[in-house]
């Protein structure tokens, strides 16, 4: 069955926002005299539960913290770190090639639309996508709902679509929806288990989209 659509995760896949988010949380924990354990981060990365999980973990070590007071502080730190962040290497080439081939494109992200859409605009890639599905309107990964919604929005079948993910939770979501899934881990997730993925690439520059489509 020929490929008609590509569906991309956002955080960590199209842009390495996860490194900035992790750094900001590490700073918050250190401000309170605590180190953030990476196993706790890996347990929630790629889901919708990162912020509440981090505040809950911090509260275990520092009783009496006020999450609502800290929330704007952590967000401001992330946004400052992201000011100069671009897309991951090779992403624009994939998007251009996809459009040249007439493929439909979507974003499927567990993050909210208020987070994803402004970043897509800032990165200058919003116009490439025919649909943007986000976790404020759909069940977050590893549930398949975001990918099922993307298939519906693009009017394509699972067998006609390829997902691109950077976390095992995302891969689980894509595979549960029936898509072929290409894992492109980043520096934060490269040590995790991507055994469920159909293809694992160290970067988008490791293989061209044409080569991937002809495999």
Image: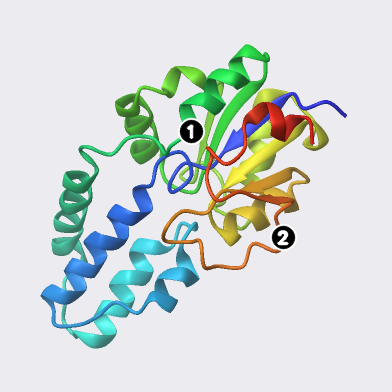
Quadrant, the C terminus: top right
Q: Residue at x 34, y 62 (%)?
A: 51
Comparing marks 2 and 1, which lies closer to the viewer? Answer: 1
Nearer the N terminus, badge 2 or badge 1? 1
Give the image location of residue 80, x and y in percent.
Answer: 16, 45
Label 2 packing within 10 angstroms: few (<14), some (14-19), many (20+): some
Task: Give coordinates of residue 149: x percent, y percent.
Answer: 65, 36
Residue shown at 16%/75% (left/top)? 30
Residue drawn at x 16%, y 63% as measured from the top left: 70
Between marks 2 and 1, how big is the CA–CA gap? 23 Å
Using residue 46 as the reference point, say whether residue 152 is left or right of it: right
Circle 1 SS class: loop
The disc label shown at residue 90, or none:
1
Relative image position of residue 166 (x, y in whole percent)? 53, 52
Disc on res. 196: 2
Q: Is residue 150 above or below residue 167?
A: above
Q: Which mark is residue 159?
A: none
């Amino acid at each position: 069955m020929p490929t008609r659509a590509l569906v991309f995760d956002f955080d960590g896949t199209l842009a390495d926002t996860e490194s900035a988010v992790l750094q900001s949380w590490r700073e918050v924990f250190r401000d309170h005299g605590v180190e953030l354990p990476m196993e706790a981060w890996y347990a929630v990365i790629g889901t919708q539960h990162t912020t509440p999980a981090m505040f809950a973990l911090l509260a275990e070590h520092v009783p009496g913290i006020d999450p609502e007071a800290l929330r704007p502080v952590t967000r401001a730190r992330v946004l400052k770190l992201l000011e100069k962040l671009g897309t991951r290497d090779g992403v624009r080439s994939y998007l251009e090639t996809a459009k040249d081939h007439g493929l439909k494109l979507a974003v499927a992200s567990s993050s909210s639309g208020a987070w994803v859409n402004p970043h897509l605009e800032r990165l200058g890639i919003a116009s490439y996508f025919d649909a943007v599905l986000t976790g404020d309107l759909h069940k977050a990964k590893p549930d398949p709902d975001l990918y099922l919604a993307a298939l519906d929005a693009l009017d394509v079948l699972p067998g006609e679509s390829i997902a691109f993910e950077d976390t095992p939770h995302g891969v689980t979501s894509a595979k549960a929806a029936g898509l072929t899934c290409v894992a492109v881990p980043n520096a934060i997730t490269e040590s995790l288990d991507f055994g469920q993925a159909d293809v694992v690439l160290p970067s988008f520059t490791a293989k061209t989209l044409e080569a991937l489509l002809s495999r």
